[in-house]
Amino acid sequence: MVLLDDSGPIFAQIADQLADQIADGQLGEGARVPSTNELAAFYRINPATAGAREQLVRARRRRFAERYVRPLVTEAVRLGFGREELLALIREEPAWAGVPAEGRA
């Protein structure tokens, strides 16, 4: 686990670290993530501070859609891509190499 700093709320830093580990593949599908109590013990914080992961992941996914998906779709429409054509481009993206098909849905 990475140490925390003063750059923002503790729970947000923990959530960002976990999300980064999931995104980087360090925590694979079905992998066990540290419990709230384990995180609290490691960082010496109140367990309530460490328990906001689910809410933060939802918020981060929403921000992802706003920052990346919406502009992508807007530009695709501007360029004349149809929905299926855009989805095919995404499915064929080389960045998916090594990602199981069920992880692409």
Image (cartoon, rainbow, N blue to C red):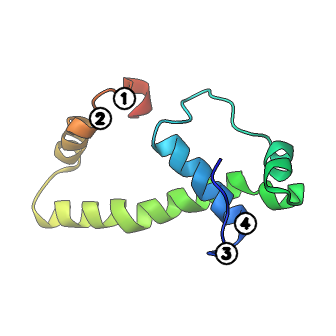
In the rendered structure, find residue 10 and report the number of the disc placed on it. 4
Residue drawn at x 74%, y 39% is 34
Question: In this rendering, is residue 3 above or below 22?
Answer: below
Name the spot of residue 66 as percent of width and height, x first: 42, 67
Amino acid tagged 3 = Asp
**Are discs 4 and 3 less than 8 Å apart at CB?**
no
In the rendered structure, find residue 99 and report the number of the disc placed on it. 1
Q: Mark 4 vs mark 2: give the one in front.
A: 4
- Residue hosting label 2: 96
Q: Say whether disc 2 or disc 3 marks the residue closer to the N-terminus.
A: 3
Amino acid tagged 2 = Trp
Mark 2 is surrounded, within 10 Å at the Cα level, by few (under 14), some (14 to 19) or many (20 or more) other residues, namely: few
**Are discs 1 and 2 less than 8 Å apart at CB?**
yes
Residue 41 relative to residue 95: left or right: right
Residue drawn at x 82%, y 47% is 36
Question: In this rendering, is residue 63 above or below 25?
Answer: below
Helix or strand or loop: what does disc 1 sit on? loop
- Residue hosting label 3: 6
Residue drawn at x 67%, y 75% is 6
Helix or strand or loop: what does disc 2 sit on? helix
